Image (tube, grey):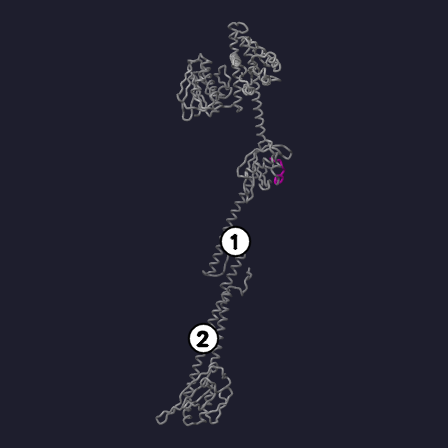
Amino acid sequence: MKRRILLIDDETFLLKVLLVRLKHWGFDALGAENGPDGFLIIRQNKPDLIILDKEMPGMNGEDVVRLVRRDPSLKQIPIIMISADVENIEACAKACGIAHYLTKPCEPEDLLEMIQMQFAQSEHRENT
Amino acid sequence: MKPENPIGIRRSIATKLLKIVFSFYLLVAVSLTIGQMVMEYRYQKSSVEHDLKAIQQTYEKGLAIDLWQLDDESLSSIIEGMLKLPVVIGVSVRNARGVDVAIGGIIHHHGVRVGNVGQHINLLGLGKEVTTLYDEHHSDNNYVFTHEFPLSYVHGGKTDQLGRVTLYSNSSVVFQRVKLGFLLIVLNAILKTVALWFIFLYFSKKLLRKPLLSLASAVENLSLDNLDSVRVDVGTSGRNELKVIEDSFNSMIGNLRNSVMERERATKALRESEMLRKRVFDSSRIPIVVMDAATCQYVDCNAAAVQVYRYASREDVVGKTPLAFSAPVQYDGTSSDIKALHYITEALEGRPVVFEWLHKRPDGELWDAEVHLLSFSVEGTTMLQFSLLDITDRKRAEEATTLLANAKNKFISVVSHELRSPLATIKEATSLVREEVLGPLNDEQKEMLEIAKSNINRLGRLVNNVLLYQKIDAGKMQYDFLENNINEIIQEAYRNTVLATPERKEDLVINLTPKLPQTRCDKDKIIQVLLNLISNGIKYSDHGPIVIETRLNAHEIEFSLRDAGQGIYPEEIENIFIPFSHGRGRKTGGTGLGLAICKEIILAHSGRIWVESERGKGSTFYFTLPI
């Protein structure tokens, strides 16, 4: 069964090309252009992994992470944060309790590696 | 001017001296006079005794004959005759048996008075009476003295002792004789005393009193103003005590004159110095205000202070407290009075205090000053000096610079972030096409997309470096200094480089000094420097070795990287570590910030970085890290 990945980013073009990339890698990729839409999809589709942009107008990446982590049925979903704000991404990820983040622009290989690592960890958790 | 005699004659030293001297003189004179008188008395007494002897010789024979013949009448007339002599006051004649046979005048018999004034004396017991045997001058209080002699009669070769005659006389007889002599002696003594008195007075006045009074007058008239004209002259000639006093006074006046002149010179110098200070104070372009620490009121200020405070005159400033010239609140939000008190207290503890102060002018305009506050003491009063430096313009400029710098940093940050997102999209989109995810490509298309990838990466690096440099420039770069081995760091950088550019692996020559000491550095930052230098070496030398070496110096480890490229033009060497200072030999792919970032990182490690290069012979980059 294909792993389902939700990508939330207000950059429409990046969202589009990354969805192509994820699908190319064989994932069931979903996309949302803002936080509320993204959170709605999370609740409805329960993705296996969320990749979200830190900076978004209105509800930003941090707000979405907080909502997800507050919901007991969703809080186990692994999240990867991406951001163009190279200076603050580390601090922000740490504050949100996220272990993995990437800065824009990132290499596709790095992203794939991180996704695979997340799934491996999830599987390990499920098995134990 | 004749000096007013301040001392009465009675109180004069001369008079006192005179009294003492004359007391002694009088004592001596009186003693001598008494002595003279005693001598005179004795002389006259012996003269009386001599007279009595002469009487004896005159009457001795007649008395003997009369007594032998018992001729009463003759005896009586002889005695009467004897009593008429002035020296004889009494006569007694005793026979051989010791019986008085004739007596006359005042006589003393064994100390007992027999005859007296006015008494009639019986002579010889024959009824013959002799009257008025002595005159009235013979006072019976006077001392009586006698002259006795024997009476003898010679007949037929035989001497018969008939009796004895006693002649009486007394001191009044002598006194009668010495009276004139005494008078002359006393007169002589009085005259001598008076004459000496006046002579002494005259000379004491001439020799002592006058010179002393003239000295007193000179001293009395002496003042600091007439030291040049006054000279003491006691009017004596020769070397004596007064002359010594005169010389001493004149010498004292001379010393005083010198001292006064010296003082005048010192006073003048002090006045000039004060004037100079005042001038310097007044004409100083640095505003200076002086405050009495006790009252906290300004007591003085110079023209520059009046001007900077924007007041009309010094009087407008003097008497006010510092708060009258201050903004109510300072930049940090503290009330001016609390902050002022803090600084004043600190200055009063003896420390010079420098601080920035927000002032207020009468029209409400605010201005900034750098205040230098120090305390000093003037005759027990503690003062505080405020030197003001108007830094309003500097402060505004600093604020503007800070604002500008902040704006620039913000701009760079925002632009960098804003560049990243589209860059990520472009990168991802071209990657998808280049990787033929969306369909196969021909070789030319692939090549074009490789060029696009390379430049997208370059743009990414540029954005990264701009952000990094801005972070360093803003002082926000954080370093994690730990003990590290530089050789290990170089090996790590080498491995990264080989991974990125395997085609130049053979050219990279690592020649490290073994067992180098640990150095405190931020490993990631040093790797960044090394990667930058190595990639530069690779970029600027298409072929040939790139030699990396380490060396141990006295207090540092030296790293060097030598390439075999074209080298740097001499005029560009100086600017090579300045941002965006690409040289003429510039190669594509650089960001213009790499070496500038390297320099900042090495400087943050207290190290040095430099380059040595010769055009056509390659370059060697060096940096050092302290041990």
Side of B332 relative to B169 (left or right): right
Q: Amino acid at mark 1?
A: Leu
Residue B611, compared with residue B9, is above or below; it is above
Residue A73 vs residue B96, the one in the foreground = A73
> How far apart in space, not on screen, are marks 2 and 1 (Cα)?
60 Å
Determine which residue is flagged by label 1.
B227
Q: Secondary structure at mark 1?
A: loop
Q: Secondary structure at mark 2?
A: helix
Q: Residue at x 46, y 25 (%)?
A: B606
Pinpoint residue A83: horizontal percent, then vertical percent: 56, 17
Q: Position of residue A60 (x, y in %)?
A: 60, 17
Where the N terminus of chain B falls, by quadrant? bottom right
Mark 1 crowdedness (10 Å alpha carbons): few <14, some 14-19, many ≥20: some
Q: Is residue B488 above or below residue B225?
A: above
Quarter of the view holding residue B49: bottom left
Answer whether residue B64 is magenta in the image. Answer: no
B54 horizontally vs B217: left or right: left
Q: Is residue B567 left or right of residue B409?
A: left
Mark 2: which amino acid? Gly
Say left or right for B158 vs A71.
left
- Residue segment shown in magenta: B308-318
Q: Which mark is residue B35?
A: 2
